[in-house]
Image (tube, helix red, strand yellow):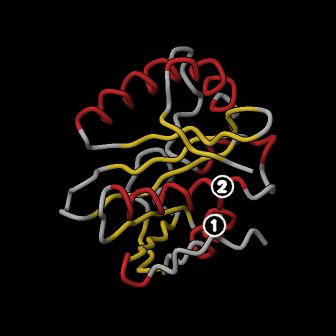
Amino acid sequence: MLAIRPLEPGDVERVQELASDPAIGATSLVPSPFPADGAAVFVARSGAQRAAGTDFVFALVAEPGLVGVAALHGVGAPPGSAELGYWVGRPFWGRGFASAGAGEVVRWGFATLGLARITSHCLARNTASARVLRRLGFRETGRVANTHPKWSPDETVVHFELLRRTWSGAPPDSR
């Protein structure tokens, strides 16, 4: 069973521990190497962004505690939309936490924020993330050469979107 809740100051130590794993930064926008104060800065910034209504960052919580993070970024830019991002600590990979957590954040975004559209993206080589998005009902909208300085321009980024009007609302299939 997984629950989501707003990220809070008490999460700093656990976020620091999990996000410091180079495997997390290898395919996400989490900095790698993760700075010594990375979690403290991230948690503080996420609180300020939540207060401003621009980003909503959630702790993914299951037994034994925080297992990852999922967020809606850029809320309302463009109007009615946001971008989904998520990561799960390596000890918890392959257990359905990414699908369950991202699915709960999508549900929250459509129900609470009234979003009409949620987008996401991943590197083409991150097949696990693409599988999560497809399970949630996202459809691929395009593939482009990477422009983010973190990765080589030879990398391909896959873009996805999910529209509220086509979203099933069903929990994701964890297979």
- Depth check: give the residue in front, 79 or 31: 79
Give whichever of 73, 21 is nearer the camera: 73
Image coordinates for residue 138, horizontal then vertical, percent: 50, 76
Q: Is mark 1 in CB contact (under 8 Å) with mark 2?
A: yes
Dividing the picture into quadrants, the one containing residue 142 is bottom left
Q: Nearer the viewer, residue 39 or 71?
A: 71
Mark 1 residue element? helix
> Percent x, y for residue 78?
19, 62
- Residue at point 43% right, 67% down? 145
Distance CA(mark 1)–CA(mark 2): 7 Å
Query: Can you tell which mark lies on residue 47?
Result: none
Residue situated furthest front in the rendering: 111
For the point 75% across and 68% down, the residue is 174
Residue 98 — which label?
2
Label 2 Cα crowd, 10 Å radius (few <14 / some 14-19 / many 20+): many
Q: Is residue 92 above or below residue 106?
A: above
Q: Is residue 141 above or below residue 17?
A: below
Mark 1: few, some, or many residues within 10 Å (few <14, many ≥20)?
Answer: many
Residue 109, position as x, y percentages in the image: 39, 58
Tag 1: amino acid? Val
Q: Residue at x 63, y 70 (%)?
A: 171
Compare marks 1 and 2 and give the one earlier in the sequence.
2
Identify the image quadrant of residue 19.
top right
Residue 132 is tagged as: 1
Q: Quadrant of the C terminus?
A: bottom right
User: How many marks on residues?
Assistant: 2
